[in-house]
Image (tube, rainbow, N blue to C red):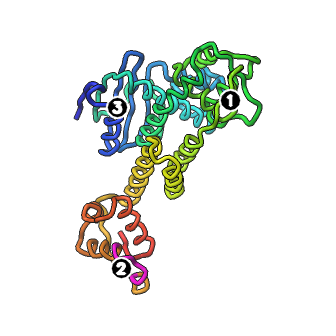
């Protein structure tokens, strides 16, 4: 199946949510006045991203980190070879940053899209990734909400930047920026952007994150106050990537109490729940059927809703049917099923 359309009538966030919820596999091509991107999907996971000149841009950024020569990285990318564990991780981080930055630019630009279930990469200039689509959507919307903050902190190209004394940043893009700022006492934002060869919005976002973390300063300007909500959201996103969903849920609960109206918090909650559900389904497919074999000891420790789940499974229903029949939320039902499996009350 293939279809295309205008992002003014089918907004990009809605399109990405549909692809994620449907766990689609294929290729999504996006185009607008200032560029184009192609995302390759496998059941809701982004497996690669493609764009003209992408490998050269990534190679330039890696070279600025000082960890590898740009021509070595470019040659390895063209041959689809590994540069080395550390550098390979840097490449994925930079490709992810470039992709999310381009999506942030695209939402207000209102371009066009084309979806096809043919995921052949052909001659496309692609970089391999392994990212949940819902994580990318969450990051895109979070950064879109913070665009005004970035523009307020970095209003023009001739701002003079200076690296702050401290630990070397962990993220590859920030290490590249830090490397450029370390070449001279004072470097303009324009110089940083031209050295990296990336879009202004992407570079400005990287500099903004460094300003907020105290790793860089704008000469003559007051330091940016840290945004505690943004910091907690970043930590929560890392926990989700590491599949520590209960810990991420605790962060959401804390954020909800502090600022229940913040859209970033609501999007974070959706992302945590969807990723947790998808993680359970990877372990227990929706078509799974279970045999019921609870011992008297196990039965005595079960809650009423868990006993109801056992009766449904005894009738021969598969997991998807039980989830639909349950009065609990999908995630709560799946967590109950996981608990029953751990207790030995259910076996596949």
Structural distance between the alpha carbons of marks 1 and 3: 34 Å
Quadrant that contains the N terminus? top left
Which residue does the image show at 59% across and 14% down from the upper left? 157
Residue identifier under label 2: 293
**Is 48 situated above or below 256?**
above
Residue 26 colored in magenta in the image: no
Residue identifier under label 3: 12
Quadrant that contains the C terminus? bottom left
Which range is magenta? 299-305
Which residue does the image show at 39% across and 82% down from the upper left? 299
Q: Nearer the viewer, mark 1 or mark 2?
A: 1
**Is 47 situated above or below 187?**
below
Sequence-earlier tag: 3 or 2: 3
Q: Are marks 1 and 3 in contact (CB under 8 Å)?
A: no
Q: Nearer the viewer, mark 3 or mark 2?
A: 3
Q: Is residue 284 visible?
A: yes
Crowdedness of circle 3 by 10 Å Cα count: few (<14), some, many (20+)? Answer: many
Residue 295 coordinates in the image, percent (x, y): 40, 84
């Amino acid at each position: 199946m293939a279809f295309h359309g205008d992002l003014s009538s089918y907004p990009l966030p809605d399109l990405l949510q549909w692809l994620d919820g449907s766990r689609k596999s294929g290729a999504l091509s996006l185009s607008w006045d200032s560029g184009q991107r192609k995302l390759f999907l496998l059941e809701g996971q982004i497996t690669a991203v493609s764009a003209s000149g992408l490998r050269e841009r990534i190679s330039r950024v890696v070279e600025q980190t000082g960890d590898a020569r740009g021509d070595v990285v470019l040659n390895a990318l063209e041959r689809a070879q590994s540069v080395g564990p550390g550098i390979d991780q840097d490449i994925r981080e930079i490709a992810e940053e470039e992709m999310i930055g381009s999506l942030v630019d695209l939402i207000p630009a209102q371009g066009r899209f084309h979806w096809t279930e043919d995921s052949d990469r052909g001659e496309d200039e692609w970089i391999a990734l392994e990212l949940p689509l819902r994580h990318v959507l969450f990051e895109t919307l979070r950064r879109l909400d913070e665009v005004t903050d970035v523009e307020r902190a970095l209003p023009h190209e001739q701002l003079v930047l200076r690296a702050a004394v401290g630990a070397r940043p962990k993220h590859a893009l920030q290490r590249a920026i830090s490397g450029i700022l370390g070449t001279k006492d004072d470097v303009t934002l324009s110089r940083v952007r031209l050295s990296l060869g990336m879009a202004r919005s992407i570079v400005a976002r990287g500099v903004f994150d460094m300003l907020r973390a105290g790793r860089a300063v704008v000469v003559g300007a007051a330091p940016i106050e840290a945004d505690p909500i943004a910091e907690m959201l970043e930590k929560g996103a890392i926990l989700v990537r590491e599949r520590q969903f209960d810990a991420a849920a605790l962060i959401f609960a804390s954020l909800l109490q502090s600022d229940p109206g913040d859209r970033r918090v609501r999007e974070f909650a959706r992302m945590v729940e969807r990723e947790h559900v998808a993680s359970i389904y990877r372990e227990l497919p929706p078509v799974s059927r279970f045999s019921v074999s609870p011992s008297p000891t196990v039965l005595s420790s079960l809650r009423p809703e868990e006993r109801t789940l056992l009766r449904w499974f005894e009738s021969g229903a598969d997991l998807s049917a039980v989830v639909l029949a349950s009065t609990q939320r999908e995630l709560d039902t799946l967590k109950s099923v996981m608990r029953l499996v751990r207790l030995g009350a259910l076996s596949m």
